[in-house]
Amino acid sequence: MPRHLLTEDHWDAIADLFPKPARTGRPPSDPRVMVDGILWILRAGAPWRDLPEDFGPWQTVWDHFDKWNANGLLDAILNRLRAAHVDVGAIDEDLWCIDGTVVRAARCAAGGGKKGIPTSPKTMRWAAREAVSRRRSICSATATVTRSTSASRPGRRTNRKP
């Protein structure tokens, strides 16, 4: 897993963003390990619970991610790492691409609704009335429509007998 970890140059670029640990109380988590864990999750797209044990408890890494995301530290870290890659020419500053093939959408994003009966009272009344009514012949409905449209046009002959 060393290829997924921060290099010394990358760590030197962001090390000054983290405050010095307090002298009293419980010793804090190593920020370098927390950043490595966060970057692993972002790279892999895996659930937090699948974080390898090398990075410590997933709850701790998630807590740091959540806190750093809220206070803007994560943005500062990513901006410095991006700037370091732009400086050496590893990435183009003007071109950014996101692979959308791995982004999942919720079921409702595709237009699907909840399963079950219609919720509109008008629709429910119509559906109930339709369920108990007698089926009409399609032929008679078509013939009625044909007769009424042809009879309404002047100068046209109808098939009706006088």
Image (cartoon, rainbow, N blue to C red):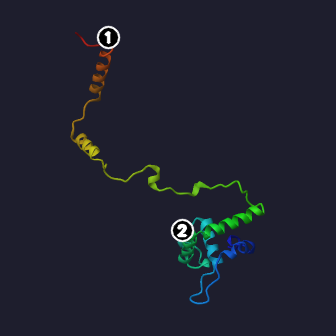
Residue at mark 2 to residue at mark 1: CA–CA distance: 74 Å
Task: Look at 24% across and 11% down and name the residue there.
Answer: 161
Q: Which mark is residue 47?
A: 2
For this view, does 60 lie left or right of residue 145?
right
Answer left or right for 9 relative to 43. Answer: right
**Is residue 52 rendered to the left or right of residue 92?**
left
Q: Quadrant of the C terminus?
A: top left
Amino acid type at image mark 2: Pro
Give the residue type that dot 1 points to.
Arg
Which of the numbered marks, if any, corresponds to residue 157?
Answer: 1
Quadrant the N terminus occupies: bottom right
Relative to the observer, which residue lies in front, 26 or 145?
Answer: 26
Q: Quadrant of residue 67?
A: bottom right
23, above or below 52, in the image: below
Q: Which residue reaches farthest bottom?
A: 24
Q: Position of residue 115 (x, y in %)?
A: 36, 53
